């Protein structure tokens, strides 16, 4: 006989992809709950206050709820209001400040262990879907001093860095946008990149602005350079062999320069938060980078699914809200089919 657990589905994470899974589960009559270690859509909440999405509003809508943004590309503030309101209207069971710590059991009788403000607890569920993203797991430089308190992995408000020497490592979209915001916020900005040119995929409206600020000397750009040490008020940078463009004033390869740095901001990418999956014993690819997933985004442990970038290791540049919400839909579709089949056969 089939013994129905307390929940059909536990969703770990309450970002846009986790919420998309919860909405899909509700549409299918499944009893589901989201566990979120922070507040609702915690990653978006932690973005810089004036962030504007690269995606258009229609591409980050979930659950059939229109996103009424004032411009084609919504702001962080609009997104927070949108996801909060739809969670309220839909009556989703979202348990914030509740961190999942371990997944045990098997399909039909999983136990998700968690830690909240009241202590340790657990939930029983027939299936589990992990949608933890990657924002809490930035790549590390691997150099002495990178864990000092003035080393950051993003900015909140430019005013924090007013009249300070700030070294930015990397030239991703976030790095370029951060450099421009900090320069206009009154910081003295140096950008360090280990390659010989800026990535061509930098947003088309940011790159000309950044290039012009570099040309006029408002932002210093060191290409073919790599941070080797971080100290409390400076960084040690090694000049690499030239590859692509290079400053006329660049030091010879192998030489090291000491740059003043009141703050160091690192933008060298992220990798998926996958500790729960590894702890659950799921199989990973040959490189050990990403879990092996079925066409329904199920891991090698039956009943344990993944949606969004949580399932893609270091490949964080091709998985977004736009396709992550589709992962959630496919996974929950399979979960609903399977649970309904189990009930029918009991």
Image (cartoon, rainbow, N blue to C red):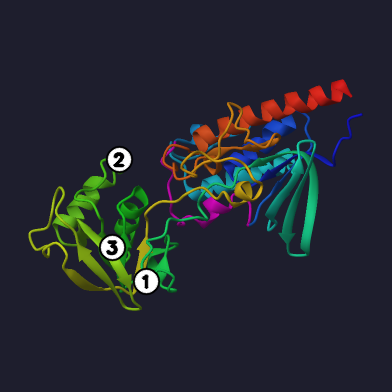
The location of residue 58, given as percent across then percent down, is: 50, 32
| Residues marked 2 and 1 touching at CB (< 8 Å) | no
Question: Dot 2: what SS?
Answer: loop
Kindly identify which residue carries mark 3.
183
The location of residue 142, given as percent across then percent down, is: 38, 63
Residue 51 among magenta residues? yes
Along the viewing direction, whichever of 92 and 244 lies nearer the viewer: 244
Identify the mark nearer the N-term, 2 or 1. 1
Q: Nearer the viewer, mark 2 or mark 1?
A: 1
Residue with the most extreme front position: 286
Q: Quadrant of the N terminus?
A: top right
Kindly identify which residue carries mark 2.
201
Question: Dot 1: what SS?
Answer: loop
The location of residue 182, given as percent across then percent down, is: 32, 62
Along the viewing direction, whichever of 32 and 44 lies nearer the viewer: 32
Instruction: Considering the whole magenta stretch, tell me its main secondary structure.
Output: loop
Q: How far apart are marks 3 and 1 (CA)?
A: 27 Å
Q: Which residue is drawn at 43% across and 61% down?
A: 153
First to last magenta residue range: 38-55
Question: Dot 3: what SS?
Answer: helix
264 lies above or below 324: below
Kindly identify which residue carries mark 1.
144
| Residues marked 3 and 2 touching at CB (< 8 Å) | no
Q: Nearer the viewer, mark 3 or mark 2?
A: 2
Q: Is residue 202 visible?
A: yes
Q: Which residue is drawn at 54% across and 41% down?
A: 284
Residue 117 among magenta residues? no
Q: Residue 104 carries which label?
A: none
């Amino acid at each position: 006989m089939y013994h129905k657990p307390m929940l059909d589905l536990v969703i770990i994470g309450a970002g846009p992809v986790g919420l998309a899974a919860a909405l899909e589960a509700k549409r299918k009559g499944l009893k589901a709950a989201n566990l979120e270690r922070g507040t609702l859509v915690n990653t978006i909440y932690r973005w810089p206050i004036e962030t504007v999405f690269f995606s258009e509003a229609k591409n980050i809508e979930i659950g059939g709820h229109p996103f009424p943004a004032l411009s084609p590309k919504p702001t962080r503030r609009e997104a927070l209001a949108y996801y909060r309101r739809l969670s309220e209207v839909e009556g989703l069971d979202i348990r914030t400040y509740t961190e999942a710590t371990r997944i045990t059991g098997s399909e039909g009788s999983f136990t998700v262990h968690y830690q909240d403000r009241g202590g340790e607890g657990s939930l029983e569920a027939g299936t589990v879907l992990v949608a933890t993203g990657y924002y809490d797991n930035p790549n590390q430089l691997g150099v002495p001093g990178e864990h000092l308190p003035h080393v950051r992995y993003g900015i909140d408000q430019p005013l924090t860095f007013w009249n300070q020497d700030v070294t930015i490592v990397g030239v991703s979209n976030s790095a370029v946008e951060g450099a421009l915001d900090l320069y206009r916020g009154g910081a003295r900005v140096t950008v360090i990149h280990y390659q010989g040119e800026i990535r061509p995929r930098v947003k088309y409206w940011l790159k000309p602005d950044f290039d012009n600020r570099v040309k006029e000397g408002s932002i210093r750009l060191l290409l073919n350079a790599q941070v080797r040490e971080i100290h409390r008020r400076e960084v040690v940078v090694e000049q690499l062999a030239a590859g692509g463009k290079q400053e006329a004033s660049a030091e010879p390869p192998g030489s090291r320069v000491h740059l003043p740095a009141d703050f160091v901001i690192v933008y060298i990418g992220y990798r998926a938060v996958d500790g729960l999956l590894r702890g659950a014993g799921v199989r990973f690819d040959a490189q050990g980078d990403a879990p092996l997933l079925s066409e329904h985004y199920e891991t090698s442990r039956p009943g344990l699914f993944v949606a969004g970038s949580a399932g893609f290791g270091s490949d964080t540049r091709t998985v977004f809200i736009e396709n992550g919400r589709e992962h959630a839909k496919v996974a929950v579709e399979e979960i609903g089919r399977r649970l309904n089949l189990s009930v029918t056969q009991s």
